[in-house]
Image (cartoon, coloured by chain):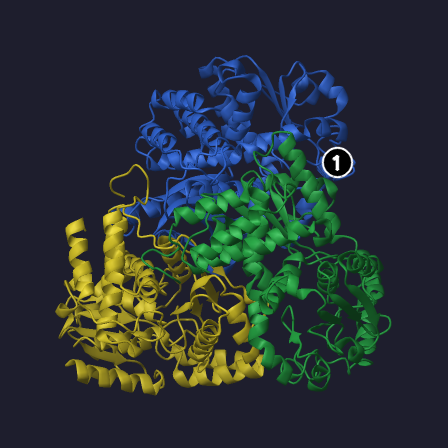
Chain colours: A blue, B yellow, C green
Amino acid sequence: MNSKQIEKKIDALASLGIPRMYNNDFLLTWDKTEEELRAVLTVAEILRGMRDANISPRIFDSGLAVAIFRDKSTRTRFSFLSAANLLGLAAQDLDETKTQIAHGETVRETANMISFLTEIIGIRDDMYLGYGHTYMKEVSEAVREGHGEGVLPQIPTLVNLQCDLDHPTQSLSDLLHLTRHFGSVEALKGKKIAMTWAYSPSYGKPLSVPQGVIGLMSRFGMEVHLAYPEGYSLIPEIEKLAGENCRTAGGTFSRSHSMAEAFAGADIVYPKSWAPYEVMQRRTGLLKAGDSKGLEELEAECLELNKGHLDWECGEQLMKRTNNALYLHCLPADISGVSCEHGEVAASVFERFRLDTYRQAGYKPYVIAAMMLLSKAKDPAALLSGILKRRAPRLAGRDRG
Amino acid sequence: MNSKQIEKKIDALASLGIPRMYNNDFLLTWDKTEEELRAVLTVAEILRGMRDANISPRIFDSGLAVAIFRDKSTRTRFSFLSAANLLGLAAQDLDETKTQIAHGETVRETANMISFLTEIIGIRDDMYLGYGHTYMKEVSEAVREGHGEGVLPQIPTLVNLQCDLDHPTQSLSDLLHLTRHFGSVEALKGKKIAMTWAYSPSYGKPLSVPQGVIGLMSRFGMEVHLAYPEGYSLIPEIEKLAGENCRTAGGTFSRSHSMAEAFAGADIVYPKSWAPYEVMQRRTGLLKAGDSKGLEELEAECLELNKGHLDWECGEQLMKRTNNALYLHCLPADISGVSCEHGEVAASVFERFRLDTYRQAGYKPYVIAAMMLLSKAKDPAALLSGILKRRAPRLAGRDRG
Amino acid sequence: MNSKQIEKKIDALASLGIPRMYNNDFLLTWDKTEEELRAVLTVAEILRGMRDANISPRIFDSGLAVAIFRDKSTRTRFSFLSAANLLGLAAQDLDETKTQIAHGETVRETANMISFLTEIIGIRDDMYLGYGHTYMKEVSEAVREGHGEGVLPQIPTLVNLQCDLDHPTQSLSDLLHLTRHFGSVEALKGKKIAMTWAYSPSYGKPLSVPQGVIGLMSRFGMEVHLAYPEGYSLIPEIEKLAGENCRTAGGTFSRSHSMAEAFAGADIVYPKSWAPYEVMQRRTGLLKAGDSKGLEELEAECLELNKGHLDWECGEQLMKRTNNALYLHCLPADISGVSCEHGEVAASVFERFRLDTYRQAGYKPYVIAAMMLLSKAKDPAALLSGILKRRAPRLAGRDRG
């Protein structure tokens, strides 16, 4: 993007009504208005455009962005770090093995103790159904109390880096990828997206990616098709929500237990493994009870169950049924014959879309930075306009990156 | 604070005689003059005032602040990180499990190897009586030799983040909290502070907090009362020092074995558990000898000993004996019925002062930043005056945080 | 250095023909031209001179420098962190225990996933013969593919922080130390350097330091003598390469199995332990096979083998045979009677050169920063000239560090 194009994006941003984003968290896409979602996409594109043009979008001279990862992560971790750094914040892990966050009292206290000079708190907590989102709300309430009571000079705003319900930085990166691939958000209207389960020789993969995808893609008039083997449902309330979204947005929502049906005529396919909702619920109970024998048994049972669905693989035959579909994956994918014997996707299909999946992932740092910026700027369009005029180079002595 | 008020504080700073702070460590409050202590408080308030006014007090364009934590920490760790970041330094942990600092030769060498571009070294080493402070002095001497011999272009100055003797960043945060609560350092004159032991179902808590508190609060004309069950004394030399300080400063120092006596008429109470000096000495010996069986026995013995003093709890009845006292705690507190069955403080008392203890903790980043700045600036008042004039925004496009 | 002297160095840099350094990795010194090596030394001196003169050489306003350490490190880690920070990059570890980099597919993917906003990737991978350098090339190819295909907006360039073949940041720091000690690169012509094995009670030390030293020092017309007990050879191809280098550069390359012969008339001695090439090969096989019993036996065998060469110690008698030689070591050294009973060097020799070895290590941050800068600047002399004119202070309000 050149300066003119960036200016145009800033104008588009200025036209959006987003008064509730300032000083607010980004936890679930379905809590956000369509304008707010578009603001994230637009700011992400502006920030990327600026960086490509060697214009530094740094807005902070100091401040921390704290990362709390309760599950391992490379992609999202580095995206968060990069986003923080791009805006001028120092990223800092809160390592809970060193600090032991436990009961409610401790959450409330620790949230304030790490936040005296903290602008952003990013949290991944996707292990236990019913807990991740709840924990994020507890942290948010704690720092808001702290700010209100003069403990914290600013409100640290939260970015959900994956919870038990949603994975908004992923789904919005996916969406940005789609808008670039198809040309615009409007161009997605009427497109069919197949969010399908796929076989994996692993166990306990969170539900938040498929939930996040159907929860978001249902907002833009698409035909959303969700497919999984019997017994592999997502959280029922979120499936229901996706259906309602589709009706409101003028799209359709359908479900099946057939990958072939899902892929038929699809413009976009997103085949990805997850654990059945019912298994995740039992798992949460066993984890809480510390029942390691029960967990082992559940894992064995679940892997055995998976094996009944080895044919849920995104192979060439299935791809032929699509409308020349774009393949999406949040990575890493289980690739048959590469990372495992049987997996989510055939090697030839994956290889054809490999660089596309990298590009898909590449939007995440900018999506996260956009969420950060929108929660910190009262008038984000004016702020970005000022940055564009300032033209501070990101790398000295270079015109373009 | 507005600019006028910040200027006034800078003027107050300029009037203090503090030539020995430049290029010097901050290890023990009792090695510092009253003017030096006031300088820390004053700079802390200036830095906080600037940040609140969205003026960035960044003084470094690059440089490291190395953190060596030989005991776990959340509060102090994040305070150190935040302080470093506020001034423009990148904080970096020295992880000793990866690096193995051991005998004297290694300390000397490693201290230099991590310091080529390091401005500040923060150390927490509070586990062994007789070792933490000694270790800090070894590190300090090593980097001073390195500087003198042309190895290091600057002197990395040390900040004691808790040793076996003192916890100056804690006690000075406590003091700053008190001066804000009571109006000024002068207003503390004649106030009674009760530093008392309290029951905890844990074992081996360091002595440095109570030692730091009596070592510092004794400097300002207060009535310092130290209370603990028989056998729970602090390091005798430091109790003695506190007494001498009080005499010099026109206050009083008293001791008892009664929480009730300590609380009577107190303006400030600081009930907090610690391990008896004699136990800590035995523990140090056993740790050095690697006698894990002996350590287990000592722990059991000590926990049993503690149980004889379950009544050392800061409850409502005791609080009624005080002069409407302010409750202090360095956090986390053992709260009866919340974090444990019987603890240091009753839930209702803690909840009433909970936000106050958060505010108390909130001074620490600024106290640490002040120690850093004062060790790096030849003329700190002139430096801060220049920063105030520069008015670089901490967050672009915002007037106030 | 004052501004005039820095300008002169920049002029010298401008006269070097180094078009291939831009957007290129630094993996092996023997892949680099003499002009490219001189450019590293020159930029390292310029950066050090600027920092000493309180001129900030920061060229990045944001960006990451990712560190991948597959073997523990203090010295090199802190040098890398410091270099990144000096230029304005945030250093970030990729912790592989959290991320699991394994087969080729994963390397390719992870390399891109961590690189969306990454400028530099520093890698230490020195454990397995035949793997470290190969892994670095895989990472390099992966990010170049990513850049070419629009995944990455910039090419993250690699800095080899020690592989199985070379340790260029070490050997170039050693070289810079020598040029400062003897006056210039030219002054090294005809000087005798003895790179010798030395006894150590440890096992499995990598070959890359001695290989790096003979691979680099052979480029400048020196008399390079390599000595080790029978059976302790380096990788044969690299010994051969050093010989060829010496012939080309007008020096000599000799080998012996005698420390006395090596030290005779030497101007520089570098006595350092390493594991025999043949042992390292067997070790690699056993490690790959996960044969822990075999590894234990190999270790015992190798330590026993070492004991036959206790006399390979850099003692006073040997030092007397030299031409008042400068002692070098990459640290930490095994010092007889200090860090072990029998070691690489006598305590009195080490103590005499201790601060010299610290100074030797002190060039590493600047050498790494120079490698970074030269891979990022199309016209490094113009960039540095601009920085010198800008005169942004590294520490506000100070004239000199």
> Above or below — where is A392 with respect to A194?
below
Name the residue type under label 1: Lys
Q: Position of residue B13 (x, y in %)?
A: 20, 64
Of residues B259 and A123, the one nearer the viewer is: A123
Q: Position of residue B244 (x, y in %)?
A: 23, 86
**How many marks are shown on the rendered structure?**
1
> Above or below — where is C69 with respect to B127?
above
Task: Please report the residue visible at 28 percent of the width from the left and 78 percent of the height from the top.
Answer: B215
Instruction: Work out which quarter of the rendered image holds the C terminus of chain B and state it.
Output: top left
Task: Please report the residue visible at 71 percent of the width from the left and 72 percent of the height from the top.
Answer: C272
Q: Is residue A113 visible?
A: no
Of residues C143 and C188, the one nearer the viewer is: C188
State the SS at label 1. Answer: helix
Task: Please report the residue visible at 37 percent of the width from the left and 65 percent of the height from the top.
Answer: B334
Along the horizontal axis of the image, is A230 left or right of C297?
Answer: left
Mark 1 — residue?
A307
Q: Position of residue B361 (x, y in %)?
A: 31, 60
Tell me if mark 1 has few (under 14), some (14-19) or many (20+) residues whose alpha carbon lies within 10 angstroms of its own. some
The subunit letter for the residue under badge 1 reads: A
Q: Position of residue A28 (x, y in %)?
A: 45, 33
> Above or below — where is A33 with respect to B309?
above
Of residues B138 and C230, the one nearer the viewer is: C230
Task: Please report the residue visible at 34 percent of the width from the left and 73 percent of the height from the top.
Answer: B209
Q: Is residue A339 visible?
A: yes
Q: Quadrant of residue B65?
A: bottom left
Along the horizontal axis of the image, is B353 left or right of A182?
Answer: left
Along the horizontal axis of the image, is A108 left or right of C47?
Answer: left
